[in-house]
Amino acid sequence: NAVYPALVGSAAVTAAGSAQGDAAQLYHGFNVVTGADGTKGVILPTAVAGMIVYLKGVTAGVLKVYPKTGGTINALSANGAISLASGATPAIFIASSSTQWYTLPLLPS
């Protein structure tokens, strides 16, 4: 029997809300997101240095991705959302601290 220590969880998430406070929760691991329409969004989990969140939007529409309150993504201001184009390559979010996320590839922000 093989052991797979690199396996991560996978979740299906439907984008929701129109702001950081009512966006749908993402999870550590791989997230497949539907429902993006240019206004709906998702929110990253509470950052822990070294945490990785993989995200793939599968609906035709821009998806807003928010950090938890007080957090930042790339060079955006605190609490600012990054917008992912529909059909884009999956984004990888990596936490470098309890408040800072970076994307791979480094997406414009």
Image (cartoon, rainbow, N blue to C red):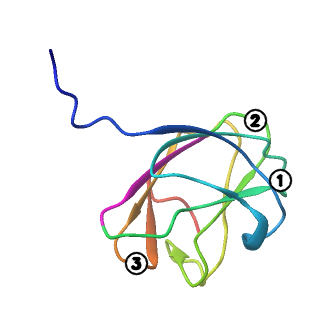
Amino acid type of the residue tagged 3 in the rendering: Ser
Label 1 packing within 10 angstroms: few (<14), some (14-19), many (20+): some
Residue 1 in picture, x, y percent from top left:
15, 14
Report the residue at 80% width, 54% height from top. 16
Q: Is residue 102 left or right of residue 72?
A: left
Viewer-proximal residue, 74 or 45? Answer: 45
The reply to whether discs 3 and 2 touch (Cβ–Cβ < 8 Å) is no
- Which residue in the structure is indicated by mark 2? 59
Span colored in magenta: 50-56
Report the residue at 75% width, 35% height from top. 59
- Which residue in the structure is indicated by mark 3? 98
Residue 38 in picture, x, y percent from top left:
83, 53
Residue 91 in picture, x, y percent from top left:
51, 48
In the drawing, what numbered circle is on residue 38? 1
Say above or below: 79 vs 12: below
Marks 1/2: CA–CA distance: 10 Å
Main secondary-structure element of the magenta-colored stretch: strand
Report the residue at 32% width, 70% height from top. 49
In the drawing, what numbered circle is on residue 52? none
Position of the C terminus by quadrant: bottom right
Label 2 packing within 10 angstroms: few (<14), some (14-19), many (20+): some
Among numbered discs 3 and 2, the one appearing first in the sequence: 2
Element carrying mark 2: loop
